[in-house]
Image (cartoon, helix red, strand yellow):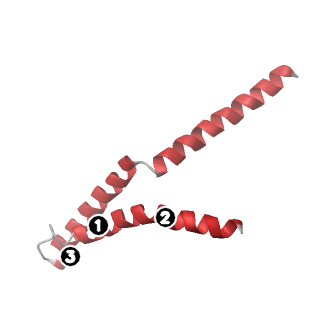
Amino acid sequence: MSNEIEARLKVIEERNARVESDKAWETSWTRKIGIALLTYIVVVVYLRYVVHIDPWINALVPVIGFFLSTLTISIVKKYWQSRRKT
């Protein structure tokens, strides 16, 4: 019986560790910068080869939009959570 409880507890602790790791990844600057760089590269390629314009400055627009959204989304989330509790 004790071994069964210990095994179940270990499974729960491992799941909690994975959930915490996923949560940390979702809010990490590494993830945000990675997404921004990939967005920039995709937009540069699109503007250069599909639209045929000089893309270097124009490609910053969606990247700046992404960064602004990551900064403001936590504010919106906190507001939503406070309104939802009532």
Answer with the quarter of the image where residue 2 lies: top right
* Quadrant holding the C terminus: bottom right
Front-lying residue, 51 or 22: 22
Q: Position of residue 11 (x, y in %)?
A: 70, 33
Does dot 1 land on a helix, a strand or a loop?
helix
Residue at point 59% right, 43% down?
19
Residue at the extreme bottom of the image, as rendered: 51
Tag 1: residue type? Answer: Ile
Label for residue 44? none
Does dot 3 land on a helix, a strand or a loop?
helix
Residue at point 58% right, 40% down?
18
Q: Indicate which disc, 2 or 1, sits on the residue closer to the N terminus.
A: 1
In-image side of 1 versus 31 (left or right)? right
Badge 2 vs badge 3, beta-carbon distance below 8 Å: no
Q: Which residue is mark 3?
A: 50
Residue at point 47% right, 46% down?
25
Label for residue 64? 1
Residue at the extreme right of the image, as rendered: 1
Q: Which residue is mark 2?
A: 75
